[in-house]
Amino acid sequence: MNILLFGGTGDGRELALWLRSKGITFTVCVATAYGETLLPPDIKAHVGRMDQAAMAAFMGQGGYTLVVDATHPYAAEVTKNIRAAAKETGLPYLRLLRQSNGEDLCHKADSMATAARMLLRLPGNVLLTTGSKELHHFALPGLRERCYPRVLPMADSLERCLSLGFPPKNVICMQGPFSKELNVALLHQYAIKTMVTKDTGGYGGFREKAEAAKEAGCALLVVERPVEEEGLVMDELQDTIIRMVAK
């Protein structure tokens, strides 16, 4: 078996380490060089963003027998392209799902744009833990000045924050995972009244954020997942791969 694993997430890295421990041949696709640095150096990786056509070409030239999609649950377009490319090349496709938290949360929004509109009606400073790609939704007059984006320590993430007009003193460049204690400290340090997050499950540090918000007495605004997906959680996916290897 030769697996093409689309990763770049914490659960994707866990799956890669598991595949290595089982002696299964695989290649990990990550979008950025930064994503590659999070992998052990002995793991084979392909670095670079690909559209559907590039994915199909790459799948067809590597002698792969299975495609596993462990990309972020909010990367709906990427998952759509991976699934379509696998179908085009006739390769079996498995989707690794993160279990949703399923909690009764303080505030919920169906999109980043909705979350931004809700924040306009909520008082005080805001900690944005949703990443840099969709920060433009929050770059609104009267909102951006009280937002504190927490983004990866990468030049393009910082440049995006500054180009959108977020005050330099508000930009927090840090690499997770973040403990509850660190989240609490940040909430107190910047007098945060609302923390914005995605329903990312365990690997996204959701529990630590929710517990920190409760302890610090600030509101939690959760942007829900864009689509309900079909797939397998980690244990189920690993069992499926083991059965496929045994055939």
Image (cartoon, grey):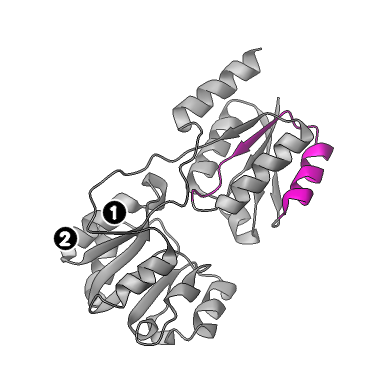
**42 or 81, nearer to the observer:** 81
Residue at the far right: name it: 61
The numbered dot on residue 215 is: 2
Label 2 residue SS: helix
Q: Residue at x 15, y 65 (%)?
A: 217
Q: Specify start and end residues of the magenta stretch as a single range.
A: 50-73
Q: Could you tell me the amino acid type at mark 2?
A: Glu
Task: Identify which amino acid the numbered label 1 is placed on.
Answer: Glu
Q: Position of residue 147 (x, y in %)?
A: 35, 78
In this rendered view, identify the residue nearer to me: 76 or 132: 76
Q: Is residue 11 left or right of residue 213?
A: right
User: Relative to residue 45, is residue 218 drawn left or right?
Assistant: left
Residue 224: % across, % down: 38, 54
Question: Residue at the location (64% across, 39% down)?
Answer: 5
Label located before the other in sequence (2 or 1): 1
Q: Image quadrant for the C terminus? A: top right
Residue 51 in the image: above or below residue 128: above
**The disc label shown at residue 148, or none:** none
- The image quarter in which residue 84 lies: top right
From the image, tell me which residue sits under label 1. Answer: 208
The N terminus lies in quadrant: top right
Residue 236 x/y as whole percent:
47, 25
